[in-house]
Image (cartoon, rainbow, N blue to C red):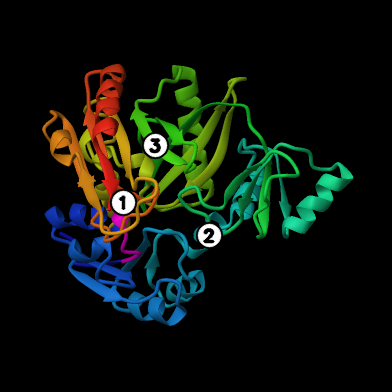
């Protein structure tokens, strides 16, 4: 197997699951993050304590490895650009990452390449948004998203009236879309240009936390919509010149339109079910991309449901997984706990994948699991 050192910026659950996927391939797998308490610390061959937002830490780490990847977008992209200039293989490229980590630049990219997306405007701050409302160039309701730094539902707000609190940051403002379904598609592209695309998933959101409660795969879409969605994803990963995984979140409107919402150039929450449900997990696929190996198959082994295990409301502290024994007694139920040392309301603490004969039977089992399992402190 390839003897190159793989270095990943970020030691959360995505880094942990990538490290687990690296073990059967006996890869030299390095992680940079702040603390040995983080999830990925015990699934890698080398853990380097440091800050992936700090220029000097990223430069020092990058010079110790051969291939540099990410598990989170908020890294120091100037360091990545300078490492590229030194000849290091950075995946995705610093140029692609710079576009993706700014939601405003993302939307401008979609517009430039005629990729369908919701209508939008960019504002420097909340005062500019208020002025636009006052002059009538912007009307309620609309969606405000901070351009940088938002994650897991943070940094997104539906502004319904003058009583709604505006986010105090440089922002992207979109028309409120008449959403029928929210779907996601994961694509992979290696350095040779080979592209493989996974089946679309349909996501159901926890409205209070504004993040995914559960998803199911395959999504309940017409064949025409599936083909159109996969075409858009293929075009997008090529136009952005992404090497590695690209997770693409889309809206299907009640008029039958497909609109690209946003993307992530890394393993993604919408692909966790692939560990058990697909021929190749998203984490192994990312490693194949990093090493420019042939891509693995993406076909489903089974329909699947993925449930996010979220910290229960009003609990903060050392996690207790109440009801876990009853859940683990169920057949075709696979529990993944991330090893986070503290639970907080709606924090992602793990996930559960259900393999099922049909989406309907899987959803029935999902209901039983969510009634039994709580993360308390």
Where residue 58 appears, as percent x and y from the top left, is 40, 76
From the viewer's perspective, is residue 138 above or below residue 317? above
Q: Earlier in the sequence, mark 1 or mark 3?
A: 3
Callout 1: few (<14), some (14-19), or many (20+) C-alpha neighbours within 10 Å?
many
Mark found first going from the N terminus, 3 or 2: 2
At which x and y percent is residue 136? 86, 41
For label 2, the residue is 149
Mark yes or no: residue 305 visible: yes
x then y, percent, for residue 318:
26, 59
Q: Hey, which quadrant is residue 47 in on the image?
A: bottom left
Please tell me whether mark 1 sits on a helix, a strand or a loop. Answer: helix
Q: CA distance from mark 3 to mark 2?
A: 21 Å
**Residue depicted at x 46% and y 17%:** 222
Most foreground residue, 212 or 329: 329
**Labels 1, 3: front one:** 3
Depth check: give the residue in front, 203 or 290.
Answer: 203
Q: CA distance from mark 2 to mark 1?
A: 23 Å
Q: Which residue is mark 3?
A: 213
Q: Residues within 10 Å of mark 2 (few under 14, many from 20)?
A: few
Visible in this render: residue 337?
no
Q: Which residue is mark 1?
A: 286
Range of the magenta residues? 8-14
CA gap between label 1 and label 3 equals 24 Å
Q: Nearer the viewer, residue 152 or 15?
A: 152
């Amino acid at each position: 197997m390839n003897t190159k050192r793989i270095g990943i910026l970020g030691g959360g659950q995505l880094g942990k699951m990538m490290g687990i996927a690296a073990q059967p391939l006996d890869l030299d797998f390095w992680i940079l993050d702040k603390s040995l308490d983080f999830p990925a610390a015990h699934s890698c061959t080398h853990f380097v304590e440091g800050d992936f937002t700090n220029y000097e830490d990223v430069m020092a780490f990058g010079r110790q490895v051969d291939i540099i990847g990410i598990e989170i977008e908020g890294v120091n992209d100037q360091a990545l650009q300078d490492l590229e200039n030194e000849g290091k293989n950075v995946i995705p490229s610093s140029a692609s990452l710079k576009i993706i980590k700014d939601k405003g630049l993302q939307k401008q990219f979609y517009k430039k390449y005629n990729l369908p997306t919701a209508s939008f405007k960019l504002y420097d701050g909340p005062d500019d948004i208020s002025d636009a409302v006052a002059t009538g160039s912007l009307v309620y309701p609309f969606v405000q998203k901070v351009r940088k730094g938002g994650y897991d539902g943070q940094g997104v707000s539906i502004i319904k009236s003058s009583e709604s609190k505006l986010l105090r940051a440089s922002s992207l403002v979109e028309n409120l879309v008449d959403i029928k379904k929210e779907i996601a598609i994961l694509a992979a592209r290696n350095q040779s240009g080979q592209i493989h695309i996974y089946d679309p998933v349909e996501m159901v959101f926890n409205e209070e936390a504004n993040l995914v409660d559960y998803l199911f795969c395959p999504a309940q879409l017409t064949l025409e919509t599936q083909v159109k969605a996969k075409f858009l994803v293929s075009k997008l990963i090529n136009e952005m010149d992404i090497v590695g995984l690209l997770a693409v979140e889309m809206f299907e409107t009640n008029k039958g339109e497909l609109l690209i919402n946003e993307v992530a150039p890394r393993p993604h929450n919408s692909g966790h079910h692939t560990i058990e449900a697909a021929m190749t997990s998203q984490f192994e696929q990312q490693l194949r991309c990093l090493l420019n190996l042939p891509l693995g198959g993406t076909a489903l082994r089974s329909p699947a449901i993925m449930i996010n295990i979220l910290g229960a409301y009003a609990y903060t502290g050392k996690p207790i997984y109440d009801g876990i024994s009853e859940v683990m007694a169920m057949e075709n139920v696979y529990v993944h706990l991330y090893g986070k040392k503290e639970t907080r309301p709606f924090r992602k603490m793990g996930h559960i994948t259900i393999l099922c004969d049909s989406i309907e039977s899987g959803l029935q089992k999902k209901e039983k699991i969510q009634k039994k399992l709580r993360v308390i402190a």
